[in-house]
Amino acid sequence: MAKISLKNAQQTQLFTYSFPLRIYYEDTDSGGVVYHGQYVRFLERARTEWLRFLGFNNTELERKYKMLWVVTEMSMNFLKAARLDDNLDVTVAVETMGRVRCTFQQEVKRGDEVLLKARVTVASVSATSFKPIEFPADVKRKMEATCL
Amino acid sequence: MAKISLKNAQQTQLFTYSFPLRIYYEDTDSGGVVYHGQYVRFLERARTEWLRFLGFNNTELERKYKMLWVVTEMSMNFLKAARLDDNLDVTVAVETMGRVRCTFQQEVKRGDEVLLKARVTVASVSATSFKPIEFPADVKRKMEATCL
Amino acid sequence: MAKISLKNAQQTQLFTYSFPLRIYYEDTDSGGVVYHGQYVRFLERARTEWLRFLGFNNTELERKYKMLWVVTEMSMNFLKAARLDDNLDVTVAVETMGRVRCTFQQEVKRGDEVLLKARVTVASVSATSFKPIEFPADVKRKMEATCL
Amino acid sequence: MAKISLKNAQQTQLFTYSFPLRIYYEDTDSGGVVYHGQYVRFLERARTEWLRFLGFNNTELERKYKMLWVVTEMSMNFLKAARLDDNLDVTVAVETMGRVRCTFQQEVKRGDEVLLKARVTVASVSATSFKPIEFPADVKRKMEATCL
């Protein structure tokens, strides 16, 4: 379901992962547009599918490494409103990658129009103690390979 | 926060528990009214506060008895639409009470207008196996005391 | 994205429309499974995509016919719990079709396992008055063609 | 339902509005804590009740001034996780107040613990064109009176 746009070699990112989604009634509010809180969910759906594209999923990460993702920081700029029945694309790109934290740049787009720009920092934490733990080596390697 | 309306002695129910809530943008959809799926949440908020009114809460039930509530069946009749800024009341009454199952009759009201009628059956299950387990005796006793 | 399963001629339904979806963190609750209220959203996403499969969408129906869909009645049987990362299919089949009302039978499945069975009645109402109005003729014709 | 804490005169803010809320199953995810996207809703509930405390509500603002609030920017720092059954307080304080935009500082607290810090910028837009419009004079006056 995901589209990958190759970009020219001078760019720091090799590719941008993009996840498509549709707007349903559940996503809208009585202002007639998408409820602003829903974008947080769209951003996470895209990060989850990007992770799956890299070969991992949250259920396995928890079972194998007792690891959970926690969002520690996020900022969003709402540029234009999405509406019922819109087809959107949500992009995922790694901005910085540390030992326990990773910052993503994400956009929500309708065709070429950028509706929302976001920066999201996630941390790897223990599923039992909620304390920070280092990313598993294979996860880190695959995630780093997507940025440069 | 809850109102309790005493009713006359011939009724099978001694009282009806009622939980108030307010409608926010998050609850509405672009049709201009409350999104129908939100009522499921309103009904559960009311059951949770009713349980707290009886002296129990879900966190303790899980810690003490390894018990979770699971909804096994529900039906809803949507009579009138709620709107932004409405103040609603959600009632909770026990219809039947078994060893592992309990059926509630609930209503969502705006003043005297009934907006939604629901019947909800919940079961007590093990938090680890998700298999049915009997209600803890003190929970059952308190719940039965509310019906007659 | 939808799969259509042809069935044998003796069945009253010619085909069952099926819509796939994935479970994300947003869909789950701290019981470890999908929050029961989310299924209402899954059922509507499937009906919306089924409608699109028939050639209609909600934005156009409102613009062209001043028509909104309203759910007037629904019942759900929760048989098994869905979990994080599950791939589900949501089916849509018309049970009865009237002039202003239509009743659907829907299932949420994980592979061959049926997790939830639902019956949902929707009505066609005026987008301005919320009073019942007849289905547009072309919508009705297409919907009827899917049942038999 | 709201608590107002008076602070000493040297502070730039005369008071901090605080709105209480309870955590239900619908707010949590299978990580065992509150789903991060829910905080956006909590922040808006508090702003809505703060507005009501000032004497305004969204339905009237739209009817009287054809005005809607739109969130144009928000940033959140997630410091600690909230859990099922928690009682939280959400604060609202105006940081800056312009002609069409207003920036809030908000916190989500559990007792004295700060769980989340947020900065939220909202704009006043036309309910029909979604173009920025100036705040109604009485709304602006009341909002300004809360900051200093």
Image (cartoon, coloured by chain):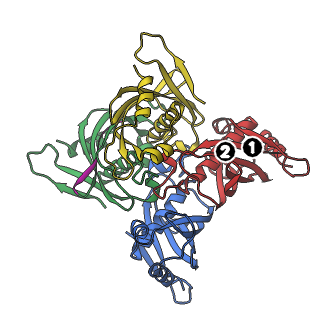
Chain colours: A blue, B yellow, C green, D red
Q: Is residue D11 left or right of residue A127?
A: right
Q: Which residue is mark 2?
A: D46
Q: Position of residue A120 (x, y in %)?
A: 58, 68
Which of C1/C24 is in front?
A: C24
Residue A133 lies, with reference to residue C136, above or below; the image says below
Query: In the drawing, does residue B96 fall left or right of residue B35?
Result: left
**Residue farthest to the left, as pictured:** C10
Q: Which residues are magenta?
A: C112-122
Q: Which badge, 1 or 2, comes first in the chain's sequence? A: 1
Q: Could you tell me if the residues under marks 1 and 2 are in contact, i.e. CB atoms within 8 Å?
A: yes
Q: Is residue D97 visible?
A: no
Query: Three-letter amino acid code at disc 2?
Result: Ala
* Chain of the residue under the numbered disc 2 shown in the image: D
Percent position of residue C24, x then y: 43, 59
Q: Check disc 1 and give the amino acid type.
A: Tyr
Q: Chain of mark 1?
A: D
